[in-house]
Amino acid sequence: MLTHLLIKNYVLIDHLELPLSPGLTIITGETGAGKSILLGAIGLLLGQRAETRVLQSQDSKCIIEGTFELSGYGLQALFEEEELDYAPLTLIRREITPNGKSRAFVNDTPVNLDLLKRITEKLIDIHSQHDSILLGNGSVQTDLLDAFGSNSEKLRLYEERYDAYKKAEEALRKINEEAGLIRKENDYHHYLWQELDHADLRAGESAGLESELAILEHAAEIKAKFLGIQQGLDGQEVSALTLLNESAYALQQINRLAPAYQALAQRLQDVLVELKDISGEIDDAADQVEINDERMATVAERLDNLYQLTKKHQVGHPDELIEIRDDLRLKIDRFESLDAVLKAAEKESEEALNQMLAQGRELSKARKAIIPRFEELISSLVRDLGIAHAVFQVNLTDQAVPARSGLERVDFLFSANKGLPPQPLRNVASGGEFSRLMLAFKYAVAEKKQLGTLIFDEIDSGISGEIARKMGEMLKQMARKHQLITITHLHQIAAFGDQHLFVYKDNTRQTTISKIRQLSEKERIEELAQMIGGQNPSESVVANARELLKNSL
């Protein structure tokens, strides 16, 4: 429910604060006073497009702010999902700056327009004669039928089954598409895998082979140099080890004479030990170096093979070929299990289809069961609203392809003239008939579901007299459970309001502005009298207005 509305710097409105009550709020006023401006401001809270030309003054920003009572609308989950602070009394604000920037806030948290629409579309429903054209839309008709039949749970279950079926169907389509590619490429993948598998790839192999090949290619030179080094260390009469041994012995002698040189003697002894060890390893290395042209050719051929494969598969290192080989093996394995995967996907899709159809038939059964009552009620209401020969019918037509809304298409048929068969609503109803039908539909579903604040903009167009009174009674009855705001020019409807707001122009300043005020009982009588008899109504007209108000409350 909308409990308070603030409008600042919007078109002809300078500053307006409007407390709103439950029940039926009537808005009247002279033509051009600003009733439609009020609706435009509320439309901004619904996420409608904002333009800088709506600013009354270009020196300050426009602010539209609505305070909403959220209990009963089930919005807490949406607030949590979007990380918004939920409060039973929530403040929604829209701002338009002079430079054209638009911002929206929910409880002072910035939100984008899509989220703003998702929230406020559950809180406010603005209906004008132009909006009645939506009745010709099949999805709107389906929603109305399900709302009247309280089919929300059956529809929810069907939508779950439908979504599950579409997901399974899409998965099957992708598997079939992939299967076609796998079948087409399998022979080539198998050929590549065999080539890599026969290559007997091992991680790090190429680095070892490159090192070995470098030794084999220079084996004679390496061996000769090793031998030369070994001779210099320990193979000649005057070798490095011989000289070091002599030096170490001399230091030992010095150490016996002067122990202060103990550390120096030990360091030389350590060098001697290390050099002996190096000499031994060089000797072993020289023995291991083998001049082997056959092995050199084998290693070179292996490396060449690895490099050819690396180039073929466009990778930077032979080790990457192992991952390619394993990936090819996975593709081959998938091809070999393809039939089983396809059968499983086909079975899942078929089961999802059957579950969807079963739930769809339940929904169809529920819809068919409530159609007679729905047809009778809408026909009766529209006749009460002045279309004496109105006939309303609902037609269900099976669809070749199930939709998310159900297994059948819902069509509303209508005839306003005696003897003429009902035709699709979008083809035969006039603007005035659409308006009355929309009111009848809203009235029919009002008892069935929680509705947001309903705003009717001159839904009474084209009616008068007793028909207008009956429309007022319907609005009053709906307002017992839902907040209604109705803009009207008919006194018969205005008399039924629980709250009466009057919109007028203030010309006392240099610039005309629109204002709105709540009428007292005395002021309501005066306004009703003027709506009946024009300016300066007679005493009898005032008495008539007083009686009309008394009988409508």
Image (cartoon, rainbow, N blue to C red):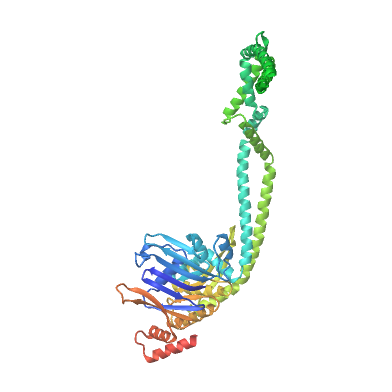
Left or right? Give the position of 435 relative to 319: left
Residue 130 visible: no
Snapshot quadrant of residue 318: top right
Residue lying at the far front in this picture: please name it: 257
Q: Is residue 520 above or below residue 429?
A: below
**Where does the image place residue 376, in percent across and percent down from the top left?**
57, 76
Residue at figure coordinates x 64%, y 24% from the top left = 208
Front one among 358 and 429? 358
**Where does the image place residue 245, in percent across and percent down from the top left?**
68, 14
**Where does the image place residue 281, in percent across and percent down from the top left?**
68, 18
Residue lying at the far top in this picture: please name it: 237
Residue 406 visible: yes
Snapshot quadrant of residue 144: bottom right
Q: Is residue 435 above or below residue 300?
A: below
Q: Is residue 254 above or below residue 87?
A: above
Residue at figure coordinates x 63%, y 61% from the top left = 158
Q: Is residue 264 above or below residue 516?
A: above
Left or right? Give the position of 320 relative to 108: right
**Where does the image place residue 462, in percent across and percent down from the top left?**
42, 77
